[in-house]
Amino acid sequence: MTTTTASRGRVVAPVTARPVRRTRKYDGVWPWIFLVPILVPLAIFFIWPLLRTFYYSFTTWGFFGDVSWTGVDNYVRLFSDPDFALALGNTAIYTAIVMLNVPIAVYLAALINRPGLRFKGLYRTLYFLPVVTMPVAVAIVWRMLYSGDFGLINAFLGLFGIPGPYWLSTPGLSLVAVAIVGIWLSLGFNIIVFSAGLSSIPPDLYEAASIDGASPGRQFRNITLPLLTPTIFFISVLTLIGGFQVFDLIFVMLGTGPNAARSQTLVYFFYNEGFLQNDKGYATAIGVVIIVMIAVLTAIQFRLQKKWVHYE
């Protein structure tokens, strides 16, 4: 609509109604073009191998690489295999022990981040050093430390008259010894993440709590822990996934002897069937089950976090 008015001899410019700008519902192909650098590697290196693994889990491989379809035979065999039950139990025990690094890391991060503590950077660096070290090198060093005849740990126990056990060749004890190394190996990363979470807590809350007479322990329980629950949840998810994927520590520290077979985890079981026994169809079925178990347990963690994680 166009209008023209005059007032006190002044000419008023005509007012023209602005056309209504329509909102575009579709942006065309440009968003997909920008996503190509991400989607293409994801499809090549993750989705396609995952689909092929799922397909091969229903097959049996011959000696010369010929593949034949066998349906669900690999899964029927897997769920009736006592070695699978043994590997699943060992993986659950290892993961449960390694999960102890979460409260340990929270406690150490709280100690390091105390106001007025000197050499904070040095402490963080010392704890973080194992993270930048190759796990195989760490496993070799700890294997020497755990040696029943010449290890430093047994030598230290001998000073107090305590006979040291054969840590890596005693059934049951070897898995605990490897899990202790797993805790030590991941402690530095968790402390750094928890330190970042602690630094995000407003100091005004602690000042107000101190004015109200709250003790440091009560401040830790009522302020630090609730506000740190998102970080605790994040570390818990990563630790559980890492526990179900452990292989290098078991392989290097226990070798391929009889005790390694008794202490094997799911990924070690997968390696043994796929590369030592050359039963690749059966091994892919093991791999698919590991992926499904990790996905289900992670989904359960995300479901339960609504009851104990505080995001505000």
Image: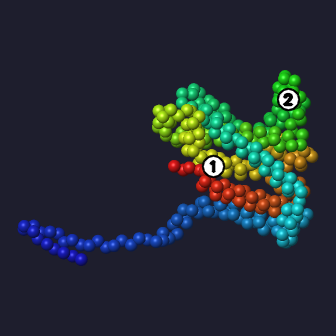
Mark 2 Cα-neighbour bin, 10 Å: few <14, some 14–19, many ≥20 = many
* Spatial separation of the CA atoms under disc 1 and disc 2: 37 Å
Say whether residue 173 is visible.
yes
> Hey, what amino acid is under mark 1?
Phe
Q: Secondary structure at mark 2?
A: helix
Q: How many labels sit on residues?
A: 2
Residue 252: x %, y % from top left: 83, 43
Mark 1 Cα-neighbour bin, 10 Å: few <14, some 14–19, many ≥20 = some
Q: Is residue 246 left or right of residue 147?
A: left
Q: Is residue 279 left or right of residue 130?
A: right
Instruction: Determine which quarter of the picture holds residue 287.
Output: bottom right
Residue 133: x %, y % from top left: 72, 38
Q: Residue at x 65, y 47 (%)?
A: 235
Question: In this picture, is 93 found above or below 209?
Answer: below
In depth, the one of 6 and 301 nearer the eye is 301
What label does residue 154 carry, if any?
2
User: For the residues carrying marks 1 and 2, which lies nearer the camera in this image?
Assistant: 1
> Hey, what amino acid is under mark 2?
Asn
Residue 107: x %, y % from top left: 64, 36
Question: In this picture, is 55 found above or below 103?
Answer: below
Question: In this picture, is 222 found above or below 45?
Answer: above
What colour scheme does the image use? rainbow
Residue 299: x %, y % from top left: 67, 58
